[in-house]
């Protein structure tokens, strides 16, 4: 973990709860330290449930040499976040609740964990044909910009957008949850490890050498089952 003198994650989290949330109804420790993926910059993600809170809130502090992220909810507010996460297909809070180690429980955690696991197993809302075609168009438009660009600074950031659009397309057309930042690759690996490696390799080749062929080939292969690139005839919002 990098600092041999600080408390172990669970002990630090338990001490934090005892000192700052002694009357809460339940608490969970989640995040990378629970998944065994912690790095020297990892923090402690702690989810609090307290029926006396009027609303949810988020707070960041440093204690016991740990950066700590607090996600506080009453016994209803978390459901709004579950619904929001479902709608955007990024199950941040359900994932934390599902994987979380119980730090304290006055009898509320089991049912909340069950809700989280049910939502995760259900998967996100299925994309309609209209949404798929709209996403095809924006991928095509970005790919065209990528292919035509000869400015190294600009094409780097076009590639970033293209990677996000393509990863989202692959995951959502396969009824899988999406992610941002490090969760793009994690979500792709959960879906298909071989594809994830192909995806990373194609963009890595571009970032290292500027060669675009593997990215272009990858995007076309992804779009091919859905009739390929889309530009001519696409319309959005016309009445």
Image: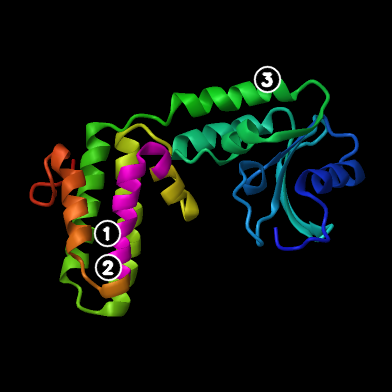
| Residue in the image at 16% along x and 50% along y | 220
The quadrant in which the C terminus is found is: top left
Disc number placed over residue 155 in the picture, else none: none
Q: According to the image, label 2 marks what residue? A: 206
Judged by depth in the image, the label closer to the viewer, 1 or 3, is 1
Q: According to the image, label 3 marks what residue? A: 111
Residues tagged 3 and 2 counted as in contact (Cβ below 8 A): no
The quadrant in which the N terminus is found is: bottom right
* Element assignment for label 3: helix
Q: Which residues are magenta?
A: 189-207
Position of 122 with respect to 33 (left or right) is left
First of labels 1, 3 by sequence position: 3
Q: How many marks?
A: 3
Binning the other alpha carbons within 10 Å of mark 2 as few (below 14), some (14 to 19) or many (20 upward) gives some
Disc number placed over residue 202 in the picture, else none: 1
> Where is residue 138 drawn, in percent x and y?
24, 53
Residue 104, quarter of the rendered image = top right
> Viewer-proximal residue, 231 or 47?
47
Report the Cα–Cα distance between label 1 and label 3: 43 Å
> Where is residue 29 drawn, in percent x and y?
72, 40
């Amino acid at each position: 973990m990098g600092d041999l003198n600080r408390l172990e994650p669970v002990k630090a989290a338990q001490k934090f709860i005892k000192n700052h949330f002694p009357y809460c109804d339940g608490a969970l420790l989640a995040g990378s330290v629970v998944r065994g993926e912690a790095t020297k910059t990892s923090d402690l993600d702690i989810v609090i449930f307290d029926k006396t809170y009027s609303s949810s809130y988020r707070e960041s502090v440093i204690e016991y040499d740990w950066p700590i992220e607090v996600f506080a909810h009453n016994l209803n507010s978390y459901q709004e976040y579950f619904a929001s996460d479902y709608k955007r297909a990024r199950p941040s809070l359900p994932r934390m609740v599902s994987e979380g180690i119980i730090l304290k429980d006055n009898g509320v955690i089991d049912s909340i964990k069950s809700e989280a696991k049910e939502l995760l197993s259900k998967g996100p809302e299925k994309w309609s044909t209209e949404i798929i075609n709209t996403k095809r168009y924006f991928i095509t438009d970005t790919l065209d910009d990528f292919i035509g660009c000869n400015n190294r600074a600009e094409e780097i950031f076009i590639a970033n957008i293209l990677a996000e659009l393509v990863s989202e397309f692959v995951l959502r057309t396969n009824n899988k949850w999406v992610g941002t930042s490090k969760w793009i690759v994690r979500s792709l690996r959960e879906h298909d490890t071989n594809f994830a490696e192909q995806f990373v390799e194609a963009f890595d080749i571009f970032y290292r050498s500027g060669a675009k062929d593997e990215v272009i080939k990858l995007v076309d292969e992804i779009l091919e089952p859905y009739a390929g690139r889309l530009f001519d005839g696409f319309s959005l919002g016309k009445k």
